[in-house]
């Protein structure tokens, strides 16, 4: 009943919202709490998702995973469902990164909502959690994207540090990027990484965790680094796998 009510509410807002009355969602570029770092991971869920989760947990760190539905892998594949559940049950935070990772600024109002809804639905089905945060692919957004996020009850998350893994930076350069940022002693860091690269998972991430913790930072989820924002709009029981509807 809770899930149905939420869908009806969203559809009602979509149907009634006129372009002149839509509001823009809040855009987050950085953490607000001192001595905290939010390590975020885009473009999954993928084959190393459980390893990323375990590495974080082993180092008393909590990560934030911005998931697609059908990008590097299909979120409904059985092994990927298990990965999403593993990450969620380990206490890490899951958020939205759209279904297929398009540049949302090139899409219509209805297309934007479809991209957002499909991945929200998948996350809800698998975990029972409905995301409260959303990251647009490539960090690309316009007013239409912000208005869609607002209607869907989500804050928009960008970053203030990029490891450089997705743009071809070598492991050495990624490590140097972390070192240079740490050396500047920022109060906090909202870091962009990607769970889809072997080198990020097995080389850059362990190094970054070590250096950040040695510098005195707590490695926390996004909601914590924002001072205790609500992680999900609501949480209910996960659903049973249905092969007739759970597919990419």
Image (cartoon, grey):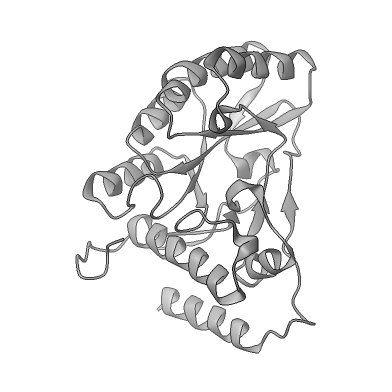
Residue closest to the eye, 52 or 58: 52
Tell me which corner region of the image, top left, top right, bottom left or bottom right, holds residue 217. top right
Residue closest to the eye, 100 or 36: 100
> Residue at coordinates 43% horizontally, 73% vertically from top-left?
3
Residue closest to the eye, 109 or 220: 109
> Residue at coordinates 51% horizontally, 18% vertically from top-left?
204
In this picture, residue 21 sits left or right of residue 172: right
Residue 1 rendering spot, x and y as whole percentages: 40, 79
Image: 3 above or below 236: below
Furthest residue in direction bottom, as rendered: 16
Tell me which corner region of the image, top left, top right, bottom left or bottom right, holds residue 10. bottom right
Residue 213 seen in the figure: no
Image: 54 above or below 138: above
Residue 151 rendering spot, x and y as whole percentages: 64, 72
Residue 113 rendering spot, x and y as whole percentages: 54, 71
Image: 101 above or below 64: below
Image: 86 above or below 118: above
> Residue at coordinates 67% horizontally, 52% vertically from top-left?
140
Residue 178 seen in the figure: yes
- Looking at the rendered image, the quarter that the C terminus falls into is bottom left
> Residue at coordinates 72% horizontally, 38% vertically from top-left?
31
Residue 209 rendering spot, x and y as whole percentages: 55, 18
In this picture, residue 144 sits left or right of residue 204: right
Count of labels in the image: 0
Furthest residue in direction left, as rendered: 243
């Amino acid at each position: 009943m809770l899930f149905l009510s939420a869908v009806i509410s969203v559809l009602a807002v979509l149907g009634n919202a006129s372009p002149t009355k839509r509001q823009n969602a809040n855009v987050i570029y950085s953490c607000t709490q001192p001595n905290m770092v939010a390590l975020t991971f885009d473009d999954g869920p993928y084959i190393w998702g459980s390893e990323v989760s375990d590495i974080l947990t082993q180092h008393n760190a909590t990560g934030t995973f911005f998931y697609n539905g059908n990008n590097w892998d299909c979120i409904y594949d059985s092994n990927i469902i298990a990965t999403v559940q593993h990450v969620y049950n380990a206490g890490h935070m899951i958020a939205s990164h759209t279904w297929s990772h398009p540049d949302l600024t090139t899409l219509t109002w209805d297309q934007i909502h479809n991209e957002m809804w499909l991945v929200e639905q998948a996350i809800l089905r698998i975990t029972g959690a409905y995301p409260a945060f959303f990251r647009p692919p490539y960090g690309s957004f316009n007013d239409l994207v912000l208005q869609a996020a607002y209607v869907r009850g989500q804050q928009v998350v960008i970053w203030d540090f990029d490891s450089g893994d997705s743009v071809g930076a070598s492991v050495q350069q990624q490590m140097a990027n972390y070192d240079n940022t740490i050396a500047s002693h920022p109060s906090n860091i909202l870091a962009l990484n990607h769970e889809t690269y072997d080198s990020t998972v097995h080389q850059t991430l362990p190094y970054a965790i070590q250096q950040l913790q040695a510098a005195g930072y707590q490695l926390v989820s996004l909601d914590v680094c924002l001072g205790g924002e609500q992680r999900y709009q609501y949480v209910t029981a996960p659903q049973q796998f249905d092969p007739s509807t759970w597919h990419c």
